Amino acid sequence: MSTSKSSLAALTLGAIGIVYGDIGTSVLYAVKTVFAAGHVALTPDNVFGILSIFFWTLTVIVSVKYVVLVLRADNHGEGGTAALLALASHAVRDRPVLRGRLLVIGMFGAALFYGDGVI
């Protein structure tokens, strides 16, 4: 994959609303579910194993996916869905059909972000 295509993929991923909040912290809410629903026996080894999985999930998702991928894409120091959409749109300015699709994806990402804020 060429550099421009990979950066476009990174921008698109960031523009569709994949932000820190839900992906990075949703594993914290799962601790109660794992032990309360009786899926796993409440033993010290299982508690340590589940917490280890959650810790490494948080570490890998947040540090690798966001710090390496999403935070590298900025629009002159600005971030967020609109800035990433502007960068993605600029990358495909000579392809109006793809640019229109990116606009729809960016609007969908903004809607997801605002909807998450309402919740």
Image (cartoon, helix red, strand yellow):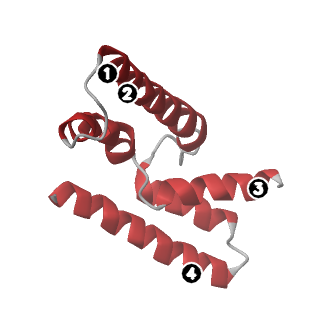
The part of the image, by quadrant, that contains residue 116 is bottom left
Residue pictured at 16% horizontal, 59% vertical = 118
The part of the image, by quadrant, that contains residue 73 is top right
Q: Amino acid at mark 3?
A: Ser
Upstream in sequence: badge 2 or badge 3: 3
Observer-side mark, 2 or 4, equals 2
Upstream in sequence: badge 2 or badge 4: 2
Q: Which mark is residue 47?
A: 1
Tag 1 and tag 3, C-beta contact below 8 Å: no
For mark 2, what is the residue?
A: 50
Observer-side mark, 1 or 3, equals 1
Q: Secondary structure at mark 4?
A: helix
Q: Secondary structure at mark 3?
A: helix
Residue pictured at 65% horizontal, 78% vertical = 98
Upstream in sequence: badge 1 or badge 4: 1
Give 57 or 111, whichever is nearer the viewer: 57
Residue pictured at 30% horizontal, 41% vertical = 39
Q: Is residue 1 above or below residue 77?
A: below
Instruction: Tell how many labels.
Output: 4
What separation in Å lies between label 2 and label 1 (alpha carbons)? 5 Å
Tag 1 and tag 4, C-beta contact below 8 Å: no
Q: Amino acid at mark 4?
A: Gly
For mark 3, what is the residue?
A: 4
Q: Quadrant of the N terminus?
A: bottom right
Tag 2 and tag 4, C-beta contact below 8 Å: no
Point out residue 113 in the picture as x, y percentages from the top left corner: 31, 59
For mark 4, what is the residue?
A: 100
Q: Residues within 10 Å of mark 1 (few under 14, many from 20)?
A: some
Q: Which mark is residue 81?
A: none
Point out residue 104 in the picture as x, y percentages from the top left corner: 47, 77
Point out residue 71 in the picture as x, y percentages from the top left corner: 53, 39
